[in-house]
Image (tube, rainbow, N blue to C red):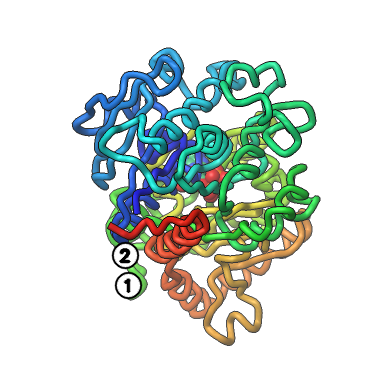
Amino acid sequence: MRILQVASELYPFVKTGGLGDVMAALPPALATAGADVRLLLPGYPALLDSLEGLTSVADTVGYPAGLRLGRVPRTGILAYLIDAPGLFDRPGNPYLGPDGRDWPDNHRRFALLGAAAAALASGRGDPRWQPDLVHAHDWHAGLVPAYVGAQGSPAASVFTIHNLAFQGLFARERFGDLGLPDSFFSIDGLEYYGQVSFMKAGLQFADRITTVSPTYAEEIQTPAWGFGLDGLLRSRRAVLSGILNGADYEIWSPESDPALPRPFDATNLSGKADAKAALQQRLGLAVEPGRLLFGAVTRLTGQKGFDLVLNALPEILGAGGQLAMLGSGDAAMEQGYRAVAERLPEQVRVTVGFDERLAHAIVGGCDMMLVPSRFEPCGLTQIYAMRYGTLPLVRRVGGLADTVVDADDAGLANGTASGVAFEDATVEALMDGIRRGFRLFAQPEVWRRLQRQAMAANFSWEAAAGRYLDLYRVALAARGQTGAIG
Ligand code: ADP
């Protein structure tokens, strides 16, 4: 089965969130399971500089852009890069200019992912390799199923929603730049209240739709969490399913993490105490093992619920707890946390920015990881935290509900509990969760047991890859193809 994975991020070269992690880990897991898998990505300088053995495979793929092919270091997966220097050779974030606003030509930049995928799927991109199936991720690749359909390619298509809140909406006037048939700009196509929606294109034209957890797959079919697309998702529910993300335990494991002072595992947690002390020291927090140290590695947005945390901070601080936060986003939230950190430097340290190594030190060194999201398609930080014996404190929603088992009476009695989960997106409910965290922390034997249970939870990419392969087979069978493995 030849599968082309199309996305706009790839850890560790270009990453703004979980999408980058998924694109680094899913393809090798599929390859291990026997699939012939390749990636298609924008030719960001960070990728053009890092891929090994790059060669040119096509001069143009519909626009003045070439296709190059090289290998991803470490995993050895083959990846096509769209070489369009004027479009992707830009400073900073893949989506935003230095002024923090979307690049005005984002529709052209990401339409190229669709055009190039369709060229490959119809045999025009690379004469030596043609996918049986294209798997497009998030709005950036939302036009992939549209172009593949428009060009009458035999390839099947799968579209995965990593976050329905970001939809890739553009003014109607941009439609002419895309080179798609006029008929595609309709209510049964990618038209969305008079605008062009890349997300809707993916949902409308893909053979199968997935999202990154089973619970989120249900939630997005409701008006509350469908972001205006719940009706369409309900109408496509027969081809919509949720496949939980995995964790790459080569990158996220306390047994081999270079960001920790020394390795540890579930049988010997003394290294965890060292990781905590080292983190407290590094961040200028009081170096005291008895203080409950909360961690956060996050985008600071309304989605992630860190406005609730700001209001619930007195509950942490009053009980002598600490907070190590790494994140950026909403300016008012950044300022709010900075103000508390300046007032109480022994208890709160906030680092504004994106820092992969500090993220590992926080995930590994804290006692509890805060993930109080209002909605959460899957969430990876709670999964990573569990492997380090850092108990997640989460809201029971989306992928958080699918991955964390609450330490209530039942969870404690039957040995499945792995964290603390609360129900409502309110300061009171979060404070109640924090208080439960302190009570559990005050019982060292119970805490150790919870840590071991959390560390034993296994969210492997192997399992997720098996589910994707089953889905690919169904999509191919519906098209009358078999796409035999190999
Ligand atoms: P989302 O993709 O919605 O932001 P996820 O939990 O799925 O949330 O994935 C977040 C990923 O991004 C994790 O790998 C997390 O460690 C990382 N991350 C988030 N914020 C930062 C940051 N400020 N610095 C470093 N890594 C971060």
Which amino acid, by three-letter code, is at mark 2?
Answer: Phe
Locate the C terminus and report the quarter of the image it occupies: bottom left
Nearest the camera: 50 or 98? Answer: 50
Q: Which residue in the structure is indicated by mark 2?
A: 264
Respond yes or no on whether mark 1 lies under 8 Å from ligand 1.
no
Residue at 41% over, 64% down: 466
Residue 102 sits above or below residue 78 on the image: above
Say which quarter of the image contains residue 118: top left
Residue at 71% over, 57% down: 219
Q: Which residue in the structure is indicated by mark 1?
A: 268
Residue 200 sits above or below residue 404 on the image: above
Decide: marks 1, 2 in contact (CB < 8 A)? Answer: yes
CA neighbours of label 1 inside 10 A, class few (<14), some (14 to 19), many (20+): few
Q: Is mark 2 on a helix, strand or loop?
A: loop
Which amino acid, by three-letter code, is at mark 1?
Answer: Asn
- Spot occupied by residue 485 in the image (x, y as percentages of width and height): 32, 59
